[in-house]
Amino acid sequence: MTQAKLPAWAIRRISRRYEKLIQAALFLCAALSVLTTAAIILVLLTNAVYAPGAKTAFFERVSFWEFVTGTHWKPVDGQYGRFGIIPLLCGTMMVAGIASLVSVPAGLGAAIYMSEYAGPREREFLKPILEILAGIPSVVFGFFALKFITPWILKPMFSLVGIDLQIFNTLSAGIVVGIMVTPLIASLSEDVIRSVPRSLREAAFALGSTRFDVSVRIVVPAALSGILAAFLLAFSRAIGETMAVTIAGGQQAIATLNPLQGAQTMTGFMVHASTGDSAADSISRMSIYAVGIALFAITLTINVISGWVLRRYREVYQ
């Protein structure tokens, strides 16, 4: 017994209903991300700027000027508390800067090799390796820096020149964060480089250019906007890294630019303070939300700049 076929108008009506259902589901997914971001901002603001009810917000006890210009960070209750974010900002920027020095040449070099030099089999082998490296938990990288990079690589290196390197130091934390964000730069940069039209490469080869000249002087400048956006996104990722810098960098909140010393980052302080025994409405606990707002503002600014760079300098090929 064969089933009767539906008429064409019925099939079109069912298709339109399924399309509307899928459109509604996609809208809910997009709205969920927006609502989640709004909820995060609301939680930060209601605990740092204005806290309704019995709680007292952080900036109702500490002036904003002291927070952004102070050079001492000692988040304790009472008259001995100091809440200048400069020490945390110095540690964060040192880690992110060292990570950029490690990840930018390594990530860009890997992207150029996979896009311009590697064959299909080599690319199929290297791409999963990078994805595996990106999937390793950050706490594992932290212990890797603490137990391998510092005692086996950095400490013997600095011992040759008479420098006794501390176990917890910013240099080791920055190196391991650079290793962590290298797959991000490599993956994004490779996608951008591979999007450059083949005709540009063929024209350069026809003029007698070598593969290195084509890669460095033709392909990379043509994809420069996307590469810069990838660098900025990776820098933002390095700023927001938590467990690796908490384990390898230490908990010394000091305003220093010496990478051989330990330093505390903004994310490291948030981890350290959230595991304490302070009261829920204490100034030390409320300082977590103030640091969170500062971190959110920094990463948001970097993401906006990366989007502007991508739109401003993007090359459109016909």
Image (cartoon, rainbow, N blue to C red):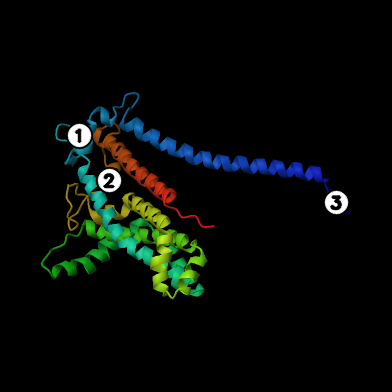
Q: Please give the label number shown on residue 266.
A: 2
Of 86 and 283, the residue lying toward us: 86
Please rate how many residues cluster around mark 3, counting C-alpha atoms within 10 Å: few if below 14, some from 14 to 19, many from 20: few
Dividing the picture into quarters, in which one does residue 182 lie?
bottom left
Tell me which residue sits at (18%, 69%) in the image: 157
Q: If you read the primary sequence from the N terminus, does the residue marked by circle 1 or circle 2 appear first?
A: 1
Circle 3 SS class: loop
| Residue 314, image x, y percentages | 44, 53
Q: Please give the label number shown on residue 3.
A: 3
- Tell me, yes or no, if residue 145 can be seen here: yes
In the picture of the structure, the residue carrying the numbered disc 1 is 66
Question: Could you tell me how far apart the alpha carbons at marks 1 and 2 are, in whole angstroms?
Answer: 17 Å
Q: Inspect the image, locate mark 1, and give the three-letter code of the amino acid beneath it.
A: Glu
Q: Inspect the image, locate mark 3, and give the three-letter code of the amino acid beneath it.
A: Gln
Q: If you read the primary sequence from the N terminus, does the residue marked by circle 1 or circle 3 appear first?
A: 3
Q: Inspect the image, locate mark 2, and give the three-letter code of the amino acid beneath it.
A: Met
Dividing the picture into quarters, in which one does residue 135 lie?
bottom left
Question: Could you tell me how far apart the alpha carbons at marks 2 and 3 are, in whole angstroms?
Answer: 66 Å
Tell me which residue sits at (87%, 54%) in the image: 2
The answer to whether marks 1 and 2 mark residues whose Cβ atoms lie closer than 8 Å is: no
Q: If you read the primary sequence from the N terminus, does the residue marked by circle 2 or circle 3 appear first?
A: 3
Mark 1 or mark 2, which is nearer to you? 1
Tell me which residue sits at (34%, 23%) in the image: 53
